[in-house]
Amino acid sequence: MNSTLKTRRLVESGLMIALATILSMLKIFHLPWGGSVTLCSMLPMILLSYRYGVKWGTFSSLVYAALQGILGAVDGTFTMVALGAENGVYSSGIFVIPYWAAVVGILLLDYIIAFTVLGLGGLFRGQKNQPLALTKGVIVAGLARFLVHVVSGFLFFGTFASWFFGEVGAFGEMMMGTFSGNLLFLLYSIIYNACFMVPEIIITAVCAYLLAKFAPAVLKVKEK
């Protein structure tokens, strides 16, 4: 890659990271304990990965992930009050750890890793049916992010299961009457994170397909 293309890639990456950050603030709806459906905030990073490859897309997504972590800190996500920690100790339902260790774990899983995996969006670049290839990239990257959030929810937010199921009526009562302990925590994490990640993936996949279908030029990098 010549110097002109390298410069263009850097500029495009900066713009895509900025666009993704702005779109992440445009929330269609927001869940009370974190997680929201946004206006296709995953798409810029996935598109960047599709244009320049998974390696570059993953690196760029890591930068984006760091910005998301900073925004989370500014919003007060990691305060003791927000996390329900007391006297510097955090109880996740599975283990009891120092407050700072919980912050590190949540930051790594729910932000750094969860958003870095958006770089997987370029896995299918080069396939003949480009709209389908980009859409598959969205689904894979979105599901990878969903799985990371599920792990984080299971490890760090199991204590919120009772609150969550207590808010959803008969279904919640049935879940708490049937399951308990770690299994209840896992089911809570799957259902809670699905509430925002499933719509997020669907919206992004539809927009990605339409973009690739009607504006295919955005998928290609000009050599000059």
Image (cartoon, helix red, strand yellow):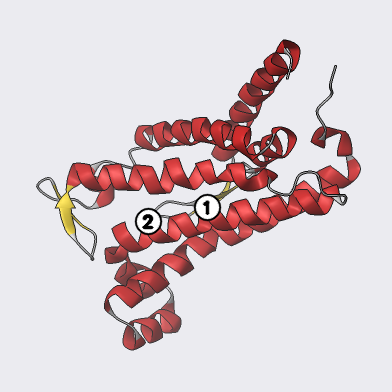
| Residue 72 location (% of width, % of height) | 40, 38
Amino acid type, label 1:
Arg
Query: Of helix, strand and loop, which one carries label 1?
Result: helix
Q: Quadrant of residue 6?
A: top right
The reply to whether residue 207 is in sight is: no
Distance from the alpha carbon under mark 2 to that under mark 1 = 11 Å
Whether residue 166 is situated above or below residue 159 in the rendered picture? below
Which residue is found at the position 37% from the left and 83% from the top?
A: 173
Q: Which mark is residue 145?
A: 1
| Residue at 48% across, 61% down | 193
Q: Residues within 10 Å of mark 1 (few under 14, many from 20)?
A: many
Name the residue type under label 2: Ser
For disc 2, the marked residue is 152
Q: Which residue lies furthest to the right in this view?
A: 214
- Left or right of 28, for residue 149: left
Residue at 30 percent across and 65 percent down: it is 158
